[in-house]
């Protein structure tokens, strides 16, 4: 159950059937929580913990002046990237997101060193230090960034999906965007074309409740964002984005729908970011109590821990993982701090591919 | 009293057309709304309806006649029974579109007797005469045959055969998978194209005009131009954004703007603005094969003009190389797109006064072929830029800066920008004419560099 702060239907896990009744159209089946094996669940835990500790460290490095500019942390939203991306087929499906992209990179198992080195603007960074926190890519993993213009990744993602369909490669594109982006016009232009052309794309709204400092209800006339695809005949599912098994369960349903050629689907992930919009956000628009309440009641990592305990995994086993993660993160910070900045000769490289 | 039926103008830029078919004959009674004839423009076949009631007393232009100028009397109608009051003779609707483009864009290779729309069959040695519109279509078709990753997407590109008929026939040959009609959704489909390019395809995105690309400029600049750099060379974006740019005729301020300077200011983009059909074809083929994002700026007024184009499907030109269109020793006129035709005509006029002007067609605006410009300046010591666009922060401004920074010692006179007036494009025919750069203005500008 979603336990995010009071919202009209925050207590609802999903509303597929309600919409289906209204629209009298075929709908994806009601998602059920994913039945993870112990090994899978342990991996989810480990991956989420890596994002949590990595982001905490990035916050520290920002405070030390080692990371500059904008830095948007994923703390609190870990279950979304892990639950969804664990369901994809590596090398076949593509992913694209906005500027809050560290977690999505880590979810791929990409070396934390080169991600952290990108944050500190070093030559070893995944974008050679030229992209920074908001602009990271890994074509090897079919991860297409890392985009700083709110909503742009939705149209670009539709283009990636168009490519999957054109090449008939069986791939699906997962396009993440936030509750803020869900008010951008191009999102709806993309919805229209995606459904019209039955593109294989899963639109994922990571509804973390605040578009910078503006809460969803202050910005959205329809604040139940899973309904935002309705007038394009895109089925929407609202999901508890704080529960990795609920997220993964929804991913399975969405992938089935899209892979069977039925066109796009929209997942609204009800989630929460614990930190400010970016590092420079004092977060005066919400109370400490609100944040603390989410942390206490619906933290995705604590939730996962509880599932593990039910499966008989001991506290000690988890402590071993915790220790291992801390080591990896500390090493990535050391690497990112000590590795050299890009050579000045790199200034004019990669502007164009060819010579003219 | 007979009413004159005149060849109508059926598009803002139509100068003449083919009287394809008469649907009435002499002696027929017609009433308002009856279809009289089918008229083929350079863009489409249109039905021509009767406005007045009466009897067709004579048909003055036989069906099948090509090159009927707008305003030509094609038939006469006599009112039945009574003598109808002289109907306001159908105002030569198109008198201004006729004269304006004709004066603005003389084409040296086109003789007066040659029809504007020539099909690709008139071959001459290794050259063939084709319209610029056909050259663009041929470039796309050839590249689509060569590479399955190439596709065309835009408004009305498929079933309608192109708003300006540039994509004519592509749907028939390549099918709906590769020739894709979009909704009216520029921002969206520019993003879809850019994403598809990032994912490995080779999209050609047609904007009905570049004025509408303002809605999509975010993807052209923020997504297409910058991602290769931001990703440290990982994510390429081999895409072509193409469509008509600059002023057409009498379409007002929001449909008449030259975006070359806008895009040319952006690192990460290639900007091409061809003048004739051979360049349009050779450079569009190069653009489609290019690994970088290209903004390809066409000109609607040139679409219907015929030029010589090399035969065969291997006519690919280098990007980033200007062309000396006419050699001269006394002054250099630098231009691009439709301005090149005006500059060549200005050079003819100047030659009558003994001034030998060298005319350079930039062809690619970014990266700019500075070497060719500076070499010409070193020879002539005088330079003007002729540009169909605004003067402020223009391509002309850039050329001027280059001449100051790198050619100062070669200058015998200030470099001048001969451009449109610095106003939104007016609609009134006389004001529009006064706004646009023309041969007279170029000739006068060149003379100023000689102090006359």
Image (tube, coloured by chain):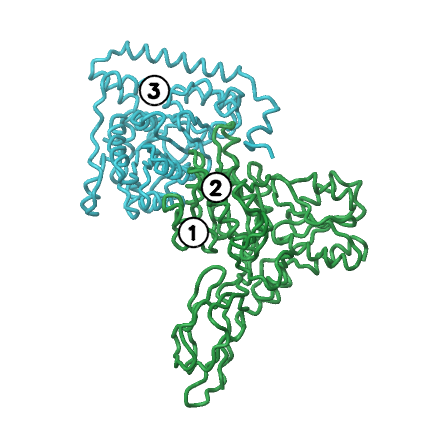
Q: Which chain is cyan?
A: A
Q: Residue at x 45, y 44 (%)?
A: B190
Tag 2 secondary structure: helix
Q: Earlier in the sequence, mark 1 or mark 2?
A: 2
Indicate the position of residue B267 as horizontal and vertical percent values: 58, 37
Q: Residue at x 55, y 68 (%)?
A: B69
From the viewer's perspective, is the residue at label 3 or at label 2 nearer?
2
Question: Horizontally, is A320 left or right of B236 in the view?
Answer: left
**Which residue in the structure is indicated by mark 3?**
A47
Q: Is residue A18 above or below residue A171?
A: below
**Which residue in the structure is indicated by mark 1?**
B169
**Which residue in the structure is indicated by mark 2?**
B143
Q: Which chain is mark 2 on?
A: B
Closer to us: A73 or A87: A87
Packing grade of label 1 (10 A; few <14, some 14-19, many >=20) is: many
Indicate the position of residue A7 as horizontal and vertical percent values: 28, 38
Q: Is residue B288 above or below residue A274?
A: below
Tag 1 secondary structure: loop
Residue B15 sits in which quadrant?
Answer: bottom right
| Colour used to depict chain B in the structure image | green
Q: Are marks 3 and 1 in contact (CB under 8 Å)?
A: no
Q: Which chain is mark 1 on?
A: B
Closer to us: B397 or B82: B82
Mark sitting on residue B11: none
Q: Are marks 1 and 2 in contact (CB under 8 Å)?
A: no
Tag 3 secondary structure: helix
């Amino acid at each position: 159950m979603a336990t995010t702060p009071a919202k009209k239907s925050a207590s609802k896990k999903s509303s597929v059937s309600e919409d289906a009744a209204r629209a009298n159209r075929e709908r994806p089946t009601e998602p059920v929580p994913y039945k993870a094996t112990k090994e899978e669940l342990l991996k989810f835990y480990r991956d989420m913990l890596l994002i949590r500790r990595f982001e905490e460290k990035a916050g520290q490095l920002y405070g030390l002046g080692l990371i500059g500019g904008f830095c948007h942390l994923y703390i609190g939203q870990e279950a979304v990237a892990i639950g969804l991306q664990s369901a994809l087929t590596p090398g076949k499906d593509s992913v694209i997101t906005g500027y809050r992209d560290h977690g999505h990179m880590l979810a791929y198992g990409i070396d934390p060193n080169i991600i952290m080195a990108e944050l500190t603007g070093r030559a070893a960074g995944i974008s050679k230090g030229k992209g920074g926190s908001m602009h990271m890519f890994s074509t090897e993993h079919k991860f297409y960034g890392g985009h700083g213009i709110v909503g742009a990744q939705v149209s670009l993602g539709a283009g990636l999906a168009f490519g999957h369909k054109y090449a008939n490669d069986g791939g699906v594109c997962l396009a993440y965007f936030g509750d803020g982006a869900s008010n951008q016009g191009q999102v709806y232009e993309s919805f229209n074309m995606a459904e019209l052309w039955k593109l294989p794309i899963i639109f994922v709204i990571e509804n973390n409740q605040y578009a910078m400092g503006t809460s969803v209800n202050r910005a959205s006339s329809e604040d139940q964002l899973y309904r935002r695809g309705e007038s394009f005949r895109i089925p929407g599912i609202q999901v508890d984005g704080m529960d990795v098994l609920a997220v993964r369960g929804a991913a399975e349903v969405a992938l089935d729908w899209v892979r069977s050629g039925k066109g796009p689907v929209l997942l609204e992930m009800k989630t929460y970011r614990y930190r400010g919009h970016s590092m420079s956000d004092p977060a005066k628009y919400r109370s400490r109590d609100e944040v603390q309440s989410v942390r206490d009641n619906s933290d995705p990592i604590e939730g996962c821990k509880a599932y593990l305990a039910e499966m008989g995994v001991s506290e000690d086993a988890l402590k071993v993982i915790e220790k291992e993660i801390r080591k990896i993160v500390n090493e990535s910070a050391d690497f990112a701090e000590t590795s050299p900045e890009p050579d000045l000769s790199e200034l004019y490289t990669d502007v164009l591919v060819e010579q003219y | 009293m007979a009413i004159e039926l005149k060849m109508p103008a059926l598009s803002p830029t139509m100068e003449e057309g083919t009287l394809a078919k008469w649907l009435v004959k002499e002696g027929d009674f017609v009433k308002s709304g009856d279809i009289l004839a089918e008229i083929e423009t350079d863009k489409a076949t249109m039905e021509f309806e009767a406005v007045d009631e009466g009897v067709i007393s004579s048909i003055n232009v036989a069906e099948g006649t090509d090159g009927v100028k707008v305003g030509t009397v094609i038939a006469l109608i006599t009112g039945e029974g009574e003598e109808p009051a002289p109907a306001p003779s159908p105002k030569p609707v198109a008198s201004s579109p006729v004269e304006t483009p004709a004066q603005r864009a003389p084409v040296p290779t086109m003789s007066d007797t040659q029809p504007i729309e020539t099909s690709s069959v008139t071959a001459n040695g290794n050259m063939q005469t084709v319209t610029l519109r056909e050259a663009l279509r041929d470039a796309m078709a050839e590249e689509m045959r060569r590479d399955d990753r190439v596709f065309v997407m835009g408004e009305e590109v498929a079933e309608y055969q192109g708003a300006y008929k540039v994509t004519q026939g592509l749907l028939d040959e390549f099918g709906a998978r590769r020739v894709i009609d979009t909704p009216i959704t520029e921002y969206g489909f520019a993003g879809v194209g850019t994403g598809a390019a990032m994912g490995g395809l080779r999209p050609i995105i047609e904007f009905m005009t570049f004025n509408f690309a303002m809605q999509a400029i975010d993807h052209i600049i923020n997504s297409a131009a910058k991602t290769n750099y931001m990703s440290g060379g990982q994510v390429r974006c081999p895409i072509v954004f193409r469509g008509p740019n600059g002023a057409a005729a009498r379409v007002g301020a929001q449909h008449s703007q030259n975006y070359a300077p806008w895009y040319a200011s952006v690192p990460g983009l290639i900007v091409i603005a061809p003048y004739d059909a051979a360049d349009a074809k050779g450079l569009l083929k190069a653009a489609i094969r290019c690994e970088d994002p290209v903004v390809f700026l066409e000109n609607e007024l040139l679409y219907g003009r015929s030029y010589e184009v090399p035969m065969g499907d291997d006519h690919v030109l280098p990007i980033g190389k200007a062309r000396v269109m006419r050699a001269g020793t006394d002054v250099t006129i630098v231009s691009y797109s439709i301005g090149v035709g005006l500059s060549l005509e200005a050079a003819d006029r100047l030659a009558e006064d003994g001034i030998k002007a060298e005319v350079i067609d930039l062809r690619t605006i970014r990266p700019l072929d500075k070497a060719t410009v500076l070499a010409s300046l070193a020879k002539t010591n005088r330079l003007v830029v002729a540009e169909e666009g605004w003067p402020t922060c223009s391509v002309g401004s850039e050329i001027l800066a280059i001449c100051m920074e790198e050619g100062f010692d070669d200058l015998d006179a200030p470099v001048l920008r001969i451009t449109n007036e610095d106003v939104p494009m007016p609609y009134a025919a006389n004001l529009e004419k006064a706004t646009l750069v023309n041969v007279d203005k170029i000739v006068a500008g060149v003379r100023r560099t000689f102090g006359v």
